[in-house]
Image (cartoon, coloured by chain):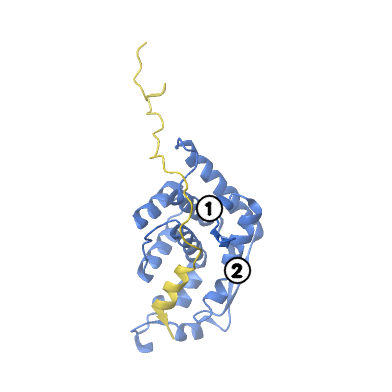
Chain colours: A yellow, B blue
Amino acid sequence: MQTTKGTGADGREAVRMYPNNSLKEPVRGFEKVAFEVVRKSFAK
Amino acid sequence: MILGGAVSNIFRDLEDAATFDAFVGDYFRSTPNELGEFVDCTLEIDASRLAYAHTEYTQNISKFALYLDSKDPDHYKRAGALLHALYLSKPITSVVFQPGLDEVDALATPIGVTYADVDKELTFGCFYRDYHNEFTSFALCYDLCRQYEDSPRDISQDYLRTICTYLFNNRNLSVESLFMLFKSLMQ
């Protein structure tokens, strides 16, 4: 029986892969930037 | 976090339960000190919810791995995975303001807004009262995601508020939608 590549037996499409982006090494240290946004946005 | 002159790969380290509990727990517990200028408060953080968040984080990573030949999700997916885990677990179970929030409001108005013009919804005290879990969770994931970017995108207070409202009002967000949030934000 001929089947369509990428189609499962239930008729649904098979899983598609995301672009193969894997975890790289970080390029900077950890900084609490979001808190800084708060400090800059609000003032006494 | 810098260890021995090299930046540790924190998203990978967070797969370890003890590291997750220490790092994420410390970040959440640091909030009163970081925001002391605007809100004087004490938090209660539930250890079992942090443990649940770790379980969700590792499961989310495993789900993404199914869709990747590398089996090693990138930092956008891991930021989405972590935010989704914290969005579900809500580690902060109580916030107590000292003194009462009414006095905090009077001390934390946005720049350019006079006290007479203050709308309560604009004050940080009310914002934090309503969105402490959403704000802290997104702040952590954004700060972590930035570590992997050569030219990270800055965010505004308006963006923070929008994200917190989005997380609060939508109770069925998928981990993939939160992954897309970080990928779209940073690129």
- Per the rendering, the mark at residue B11 is 1
Q: Position of residue B31 (x, y in %)?
A: 55, 71
Q: How many marks?
A: 2
- Per the rendering, the mark at residue B29 is 2
User: What's the amino acid at mark 1?
Assistant: Phe
One can see residue B89 in this view:
yes
- Per the rendering, the mark at residue B170 is none
One can see residue B93 in this view:
no
- Circle 2 chain: B
Image side of residue B120 versus residue B92, left or right: left
Instruction: Calculate the distance from the C-alpha at mark 2 to the C-alpha at mark 1.
Output: 19 Å
Q: Residues within 10 Å of mark 1 (few under 14, many from 20)?
A: many
Element carrying mark 1: helix
Q: Residues within 10 Å of mark 2 (few under 14, many from 20)?
A: some
Question: In the rendered image of this protein, does residue B69 appear above or below residue B100?
Answer: above
Q: Position of residue B11 (x, y in %)?
A: 53, 53
Image side of residue B151 versus residue B168, left or right: left
Question: In the rendered image of this protein, does residue B58 appear above or below residue B93?
Answer: above
Q: Position of residue B152 (x, y in %)?
A: 38, 61
Q: Nearer the viewer, residue B15 or B42?
A: B15
Residue at horizontal 49 percent and vertical 68 percent from the top: A32
